[in-house]
Image: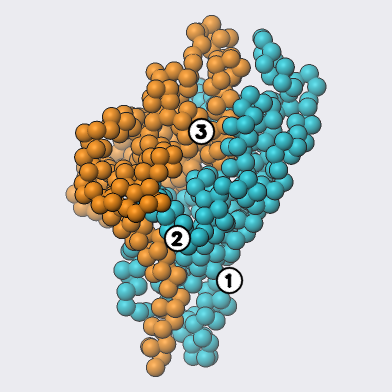
Amino acid sequence: MKRTLNRCLVYVALLFGATFCLLPFLWQLRSSIMTMPELFSYPPKLLPADPQWKNYRDVFAVMPFGRYYLNTIILVLWNIAGVLFSNISIAFALTRLRFKGRNLLFALSIGTLMIPTSVTMIPTFIEWSWFGGLNTFLPLIVPSFFGNAFFIFLLVQFFRTIPFDFDEAALIDGASYPRIMVQIILPMAKPIVAVMVIFTFLNTWNDFMGPLLFLNDQKLYTLALGLKSLLSSYNSYWHILMAAATLVVLPLIVVFFLGQKSFIAGLTMGGIKG
Amino acid sequence: MHCKKETLWGWILVSPLALGLTVWVAFPLGVAISTSLFKWNMISKPIFVGLQNYSFMLFGDHLFWQALKVTLVFTLTSVPLQMLLAFAAALLLNTQVRGMGVFRTIFYLPALIPIMVSTALWMFLYNPQYGLFNLILDNLGLPTLQWLLDSATVIPSLIIMSLWSIGNVVIIFLAGLQGIPKELEEACIIDGGNYWQRMRAVILPQMSPIIFYNLVMGIIGGLQTFTQPYIMTNGGPSNASLTLMLHLYKQAFNFSKMGYANALAVVLLLMTIAVSLLVFRSSRSWVYYEGDRK
């Protein structure tokens, strides 16, 4: 009896939480297929009389959203390339090769996790103005080629669990260090590589501050920035805005469901060992 | 020979990190600290002014104090609430009932949403005339609110919004709960402990390092709050939602006061360190590490 009661309470709480999480989304979807008068009618309507799918087409008509998709995808691909290239070799060197200063470097890299972006934001902007990188994709791509503390941490944790017998056997067979990295260690790290790809995708797709600081030219805008400019120039066209917002989110949801496992693995690996 | 090769490759492979730490961390930190002593608009030559930026901040800029208050109130209210809610959600999601997989996904989904999208969406939800929240209040027979447009409700509105996207923390807490050794809980049950005793003696101590880590990260993140007020209110109404980060951004990119903005950045860094240290300090009395002795 008491157990059934408890179970009921759990369900009530779960449903309450789920409503809080989902309701804003449902409201977004519902608004994205309404006409403007419907949206502003009083008393408000729960559902549109006739779903206006054309709102989604209108998003592309009022703003070059196709271009924004393309720009965002370009940035995502470059960032994934940079993240894989840099972090794997860095973590390999930090765990499999002995040289002076490696512990210090690892400690410093972990330390950067605590440095707030606010401090480095303006100086980085100034640096890029010296390099002539303002209003190009460079500031949003190049840093990914220099290692990311969080990914280095994940990889180092993982590489440390691989026995050194593999390296030694390969060395005796005359393999070079880069070969050991690419042909022996890397294939074992596939789960972590998946985590890095998914997180880089999400971080780049979601980044707002970076594009806001560095991109001025409308042609270079990312989806996040495009949505922002849509918000400021069409600020009462909520049906179009909500359709655009849905268009930005949709690919994320697809990627999330495709990579759910790696995704949760990445989240918990980082958060628990802290 | 062999050893030399190892060192050489070590340095080659790790060089991006060494270079990155210099170019993207050490150098910017140096620039932030040094330019905070100058008056500089990025175009004309910087003028050395000593600590003048700092003294102006403390004694001349009432917006700094306003932003400090807003940031602290927002962070110190929203982060503990987030932790509490995330913990409760994780406990719920850790029970054995049917359909749990679906609930876990639903609870996580809001955290997936880009900050720009969630900000636009919540602006719409908070809209006093056609927004969902006033519709709900109205239907419940309660008085409607101005939400983001009223200086009294703007910060609570931002806090409620921040509670929507705690999915990351929920998932981390959930994994933590699942990692608690079953023997411990069983031992507690055998000793006749009820749910609350189990919570106090086993669950909370076992979870404390995870809660601690997420608390620190949450505070660091909270002190940097920017996008939501920037998009939703631009700091208004009457600076009621002006966060330090937004103040800094405006000083730098609207008024080209790079020196002053960097002084603000340095103060924000010091604040972050101070708050983290305080939490670290307190952690000795409430965080339990396996293998530690009291």
Tell me whether marks 2 and 1 sit on the same chain: yes
To which quarter of the image does residue B254 belong?
top left
Residue picked out by circle 1: A187
Q: Which mark is residue B231?
A: 3
Letter of the chain that mark 3 sits on in the rendering: B
Judging from the image, what secondary structure is the residue with disc 3 in? helix
The mark nearer the N terminus, 2 or 1, is 2
Crowdedness near tag 3: few (<14), some (14–19) or many (≥20) residues, C-alpha within 10 Å: some
Determine if residue A30 is in view: yes
Residue picked out by circle 2: A130
Letter of the chain that mark 2 sits on in the rendering: A
Question: x, y (%) of residue A225?
Answer: 58, 42
Tag in front: 3 or 2: 2
The residue located at (38%, 40%) in the rendering is B251
Given the image, on which type of amino acid does mark 1 rest? Pro
Query: In the displayed structure, does residue B258 sit left or right of residue B57?
Result: right
Please state which of residues B279 and A159 is positioned toward the viewer in this rendering: B279
Look at the picture and state if B161 lies above or below A143. above
Crowdedness near tag 2: few (<14), some (14–19) or many (≥20) residues, C-alpha within 10 Å: few
The residue located at (25%, 52%) in the rendering is B48
Look at the picture and state if B150 lies above or below A191. above
Tag in front: 1 or 3: 3
The residue located at (41%, 60%) in the rendering is B24
Please state which of residues B182 and B292 is positioned toward the viewer in this rendering: B292
Task: Look at the image and give the colour of chain A.
Answer: cyan
